[in-house]
Image (tube, rainbow, N blue to C red):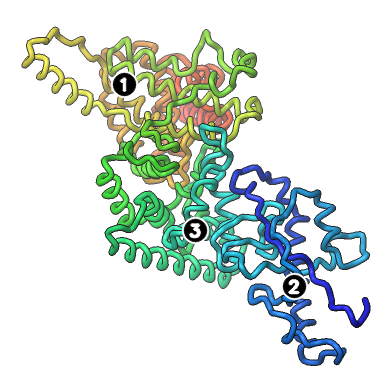
Amino acid sequence: MSKDKKPQRPTPFTFIDQSATSGSSTKQRRSQIQRHIAIQTRDQKRRLEKEASKKSQSWPDKSQSPPSEGRKRSPRDGVDVVEEQSAAPSPVVSNASTTGRFSSFSTSSSSDPFTNWPALSTPQDTTPFDVFLSGGRIDPFNALDVPAANNRELELMDYLTNVIWPGFSHLDAGGLRNPYAARWLQRSYANPALKHALLMASSVHLGSGIVSTVSNQTYQEMVSEQLFHQNEAIRYVRELLGNVNFGDVSDMLMVIICLATNVVRHTSVADLRDPSPFNPPLRSGGWLDIYGTWEFSEIHWNALMNMVKNAGGISQIREYGIPWIISYADMMQSAALAKKPMFPMMSPSGNGMPVPYEPLEDILGSTHQHLLPQLIDFTRPPGRGFDYLKTLNACDGEHVEAFKELANYTVTVQAYNDGFLPHVPETRIVDSRNAAANRLCSLPSVEEIRTADAAQDENALRSGLWKGRAERRNMNLYECLRLSALLYNILVTFPMPRSRYVRDLLSQSLKDTMESLDGRYCSQRAVGEGKLWCLMIAACSAQGSDDAEWWMQKLVELAAHIEVERWSDAEKIMDKYLWLKCACSQVGRDVWERAWRRVCVSIC
């Protein structure tokens, strides 16, 4: 390069590709090479800064003006930008090929486009929310237009947009990919409280997965980061609450949701999880393995419930995603405490309607209906064992359908595990799981059924429409099946990471109910098979506890009474109720064989 020519700098630009927020980017595109580009860019920028510093101290050519006279130093990246040049080119990046982008900025004759990558400058009139290539782990071909003041905020927003949110919803009803990012990322621009709440939630989620792989000092720095964003979010919330016209209440709801469900912790989520005898798939579906481990912030959760009440109920909240997140968080709390959920599982679209359960037939779609006979034997439909409750009139038909819905979901998960549903997004199956689990957890207890019956009878008598009621028989069998299904749910279909408390609670209730079963019906085969399934679920869940021997003893006694000795015969009975083979068969066989060996040893 001639000395009388000024050194040329790369054309300033920013990435405006919004494909990440629309969800079109894939994991494959976020390759190691792309991350290598960002690292090389950052290193090259530092080298240029050092060279510029040396030149400012000793400018080699006296005939040329020093940088301070004809150049302006960009406060953002430290790169000199020529002011006397013609109008700055547009910061829009065309859809040119990757090779074209590399060649236009190459400063080396090397054939490797990733070496000696020059630092990139940005125009002075761009907003502080523009993203440039040196933004940490941002994919340079799918950079996000996010409200970030530094590279760390870019990383957190990137993690939130490309990892957390897609785990909640892959597509919305209209086919829009990554719908949470598409709707909520832009909204955080103008709301500092929302921005800091989302950053805090992203950091807490990220830290929960890497705490065991980083040093204690690094993790404590992340905790400090989380506390900073949490305090900033709370500070801005207080300012907004002091203004009677603080704007959209939907933003405030999302802020409180983040504060309620993301509590800063100093321990790993892995240290909080309870061991489980079952090995179910989709443990992390909907981030259940993360959020199901945490205890929510009580003060913020109560504030959230008050806001929902003041809004007229969850069905009156119409902003995308908020009703779903609230009902999902409520579902996790109800499963962890063996309580009924306060809300149905709401649709994320904000239409005020619950999420309908999607059976396997609908999930397969019209192009894959030929697989259905391989997955479901319609001569022996899933959940058929619960039909006997209708014969006894132990509960209403809608209660039986809740059991059978969960049985259908069990078949769906088995098909997914066996590779029959590669075309179905995981989040779609998780939505069916949440709907089925919510309906199961909402089933009334025996006492609640009796109370409801009494109230209906009294109203019928007052109105003169009383026509009598069919006798409800062996209602305790319904209660045994309900408690066992709840136990199965938190361990297999809606696998809660922290399940020890609710396991002990449900097992004790099941033990008390079993002892009070009506003896008039216990001799019937259908009742015996139902009890056998209940005992098997309880015996498997009790492994490693003091009650394991008691449950196995009762299991063998009943099996001998109904003449079931081989495990293959026992598993056929399990299939009539709720039994996910890929998660339950191994532990079921082990418990069965151990229980029978125990009997043989005692006889000998």
Residue 488, image quadrant: top left
Q: Position of residue 154 (x, y in %)?
A: 59, 61
Q: Residues within 10 Å of mark 3 (few under 14, many from 20)?
A: some
Which of labels 2 and 3 is toward the front?
A: 3
Residue position marked by numbered label 3 in the rendering: 189
**Left or right, 520 with reference to 506:** left
Q: CA distance from mark 3 to mark 1?
A: 56 Å
The tag earlier along the polypeptide, 2 or 3, is: 2
Sequence order check, earlier mark of 1 and 2: 2
Which residue corresponds to the image point at 51% horizontal and 53% vertical from the top-left? 186
Label 1 to label 2: alpha-carbon separation:
72 Å
User: What amino acid type should be assigned to the residue bearing mark 2?
Assistant: Lys
| Label 2 residue SS | helix
State the residue at coordinates (84%, 78%): 6
Three-letter amino acid code at the position of disc 1: Leu
Q: Residues within 10 Å of mark 1 (few under 14, many from 20)?
A: many
Mark 3: secondary structure? loop
Q: CA distance from mark 2 to mark 3?
A: 28 Å
Q: List x then y, in percent, for residue 206.
A: 55, 57
- According to the picture, the residue beneath numbered tag 2 turns out to be 45
List the residue tagged with mark 1. 477
Q: Is residue 520 visible?
A: yes
Residue 503 shows in the view: no
State the image coordinates of residue 177 (x, y, percent, origin top left). 58, 39
